[in-house]
Image: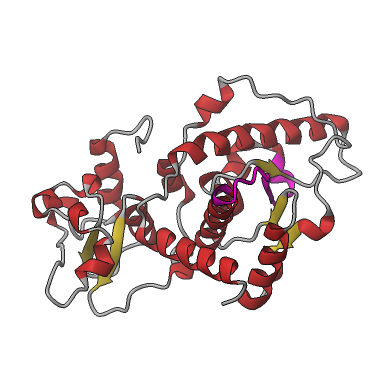
Amino acid sequence: MEFPKISKEEWKAKIEAELKGRKTLDELKYQIGKELDIDVLLQEEDRFKLEELSSFPDIPSYGIYFEGNPSNQIILESLVRGASSLYLEGETILGWDQLLDGVNMSYITFIVNDISQAENSEVSSKLSRKDTIELQEERIIDLDRQLKEETLIESLKEVIQSNGNIGLRMNDAVIMNVSLMRAIRSISEKRGRKDKLIAFIGSGEEALEYQLIRYTTQAIAAISGGCDHILFPIHEDCTEKDASKIIHISNVLTHESRMTRFNDPWKGAYVIEKITKEFIEKIEKGGP
């Protein structure tokens, strides 16, 4: 995948700055040893080539070893670049649900399409508050309620087996949400279904400004997960002017999400692929 408007040198400079002088990117050590399960790490034997280890951003699949305690920005960037596993000296492998705590959202721009592509496109803003996408309430799965996994899987099984669009009321667990959306789309595609996957994002005044809502964890997950529509709540006391602005921003993000879906920025990222596969297996079996 190409990352618009940022060169390899700029990316290295940003990451090296985050290291705060502890170590340059070229000095990071790669741990590829007999103690690692290479088949599990690399998924496909032919993807692993030793001569590629000197070119960090271009490695399709690898394990990376950090001395010290790297920041979340570097961890996330490593995953997006296709890292199969991360190893920290003196620490256990980080849980996927903890990776985004305190992340500087500006780094997430590497995994999505540039907004200029959406702004320069013909993005419709003609939807009215009454002209929303048809979706029955019982087909909306509320991730924000912190559902138990058994309940979540059962709800997804019921919704996917019936006809109609599927709605997810997002929470802030980016990695889980992205994996879940990828799993739902994969199952629908295999079954030849054309149901729409709709993300409902909780928002306040930030929905009135693109730069604020775009870098919230829920919007990042909805866009990089490739949902079909992104919707914000429009309250009854919202003015027509504000409602129109919210709808426009929603349409811009929706357009951006659809473009991102064709690239699938998470393809090859070990953690995302692993959790996506687990969700697919559990949903198709109907339980954990």
Coloring scheme of the render?
A: secondary structure
Residue 264, above or below 91: above
Picture residue at 91% right of the left edge, 43% below the top: 237
Residues shaded magenta: 189-207
Residue 231 relative to residue 49: left or right: right
- Report x, y in % for residue 165: 73, 48
Residue 201 relative to residue 238: left or right: left
Residue 71 relative to residue 275: left or right: left
Q: In which quarter of the image is residue 149?
A: bottom right
Picture residue at 67% right of the left edge, 43% below the top: 230
- Report x, y in % for residue 233: 79, 47
Asked if residue 192 is among those painted magenta in the image, a careful observer would answer yes
- Report x, y in % for residue 193: 64, 46
Which one is nearer the viewer's eye here, 240 or 21?
Answer: 240
**Which quarter of the rendering shows the N terminus?**
top left
Whether residue 278 appears in this view of the structure is yes
- Report x, y in % for residue 18: 31, 53
Residue 68, above or below 46: below
Residue 287, above or below 103: below
Which one is nearer the viewer's eye here, 77 or 262?
Answer: 262
Picture residue at 56% right of the left edge, 77% below the top: 288
Which one is nearer the viewer's eye here, 222 or 233?
Answer: 222
Specify the farthest residue to the front. Answer: 191
Picture residue at 20% right of the left edge, 59% below the top: 45
Asked if residue 49 is among those painted magenta in the image, a careful observer would answer no
